[in-house]
Image (spheres, rainbow, N blue to C red):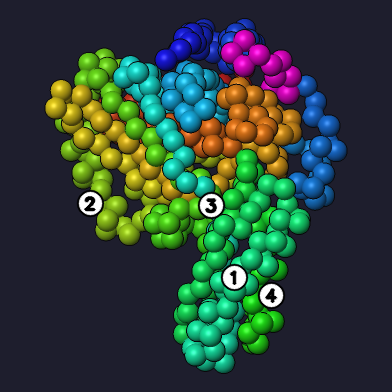
Amino acid sequence: MNRTKLPALPRSGDDDHGPEARSARLELARAACGSKLEPLDGAQVDARSARGNIENMIGFAQVPLGLAGPLCVDTSAGWREVYVPMATNEGALVASHSRGMRLLGAGGGARSRVLKQGLTQNPMLVYPDAAAATRAGQLVCELLPQWREELAQRSQHGALTDARAQVLGRRLILRLEYTTGDAIGINMAAQSADFCSRSLAQHSAALACYVHGQDVEKRANARALIEGRGRSVVVDATIPRAALAALARTTPEALVDLHRTYCLGFAQLGTQNWLVQSANGLAAVMLACGQDVAYLPECATGFLDLERTNAGDLYASATLPSLLVGTVGGGSQKGTAAACLEILGCSGDGHGNTFAEILGAVVLAGDLSLLAAFASHEFVAAHERLGRNRPPKTH
């Protein structure tokens, strides 16, 4: 496998936030992705580019943007070694993920794959009684070809792949599943779902029809964990025992034991998020890359799995069944977001799955680093050292 070797990101002990240190890192990012990245260097973004993304606009919000990495990951599009842009105000987050990425790299990198892709919508219809709802459900297969044809006439990238009905008392939940290309595809799917539910209502004399009847949109839910929504990703890696000792001052056994304890706590919580800090890494990269961060409750659901191998190393995997991200549409191709996707090599058409796979590796790196900080009892000290708990000096 052809693997490049990106240099470590430079740091300055004197003034790591000064212009020289910042410029040195920006130049590395430019060289790595082959782009000028002008919006990240202060170039003004045309306000008209935000048309369709916001109302009553007054300007652009500023969030500190840093680079983590390099991250080494085998994706469905081939081997990638990238710096990862992360937008956050949480001190120590970028450093923590960078350490996790070094751990992944010490074992030869992570392997990440999108297992399936499918955006679901769940309209709900109301009938006089359960018998009427059941009869309506039996019409879905008959109407499906018509629904597919209607969407094909309106969308070049979206397709209706499946439609099923579930009776809930006198209500019927219509489960529609779509492919969306490299976009999240929410608007396309919502328009189609509205058409399909109205069509079924007309053919079955429904009393009422609600396009967001069972609304899983932007909320943690068991269906997102079990069935998946958007892009479902699994990522795994083996981290050598020696690397854990040198970089994180812990052992495979300590991490496995700590994770087992966490799982007991998660079980009592009844949470759909069995990862350790997935929301941190996902929010930072999604914000940097122009994604809709309101999908974070769904995206952050998933599982972490740790085992000690027969050779005494650590096997780690993360499963994220509901990554709702895209590399076209929304804010992904505008200003700093487009530049950050260029850093990842994921800007534009053809990169939606690769972006999701990189995100999976980011989550695994973050979880490994944070668990190691807990296991070695260095969590609080690390935040003190990196200044998170101290106000910045103003002069």
- Image quadrant occupied by the C terminus: top right
Q: CA distance from mark 2 to mark 4?
A: 45 Å
> Hey, what amino acid is under mark 4?
Arg
Tell me, yes or no, whether the two marked residues, 3 and 2, touch with CB atoms within 8 Å. no
Residues 304 and 178: in front is: 178
- In the displayed structure image, the side of residue 114 where residue 238 appears, left or right: left
Magenta stretch in the rendered image: 31-41
Q: CA distance from mark 3 to mark 2?
A: 31 Å
Q: Nearer the viewer, mark 1 or mark 2?
A: 1
Mark earlier in primary sequence (3, 4) = 3
Tell me, yes or no, whether the two marked residues, 3 and 4, touch with CB atoms within 8 Å. no
At x 49%, y 90%, the residue is 131
Per the image, the residue denoted by label 2 is 264
Look at the numbered disc 4 and give the secondary structure of its residue. Answer: helix
State the image quarter where residue 3 is shown.
top left
Residues 287 and 57: in front is: 287
**Location of residue 251 in the rendering, given as x and y in whole percent from the top left corner:** 19, 25
Q: Nearer the viewer, mark 2 or mark 4?
A: 4
At x 78%, y 21%, the residue is 43
At x 18%, y 29%, the residue is 309
**Location of residue 270 in the rendering, given as x and y in whole percent from the top left corner:** 33, 59
> Hey, what amino acid is under mark 2?
Leu
Q: Is residue 288 above or below residue 147?
A: above
Per the image, the residue denoted by label 3 is 118
Per the image, the residue denoted by label 1 is 123
> Hey, what amino acid is under mark 3?
Gly
Residue 88, disc: none
On the question of residue 119 being in view, the answer is yes
Look at the numbered disc 3 and give the secondary structure of its residue. Answer: strand
Per the image, the residue denoted by label 4 is 198
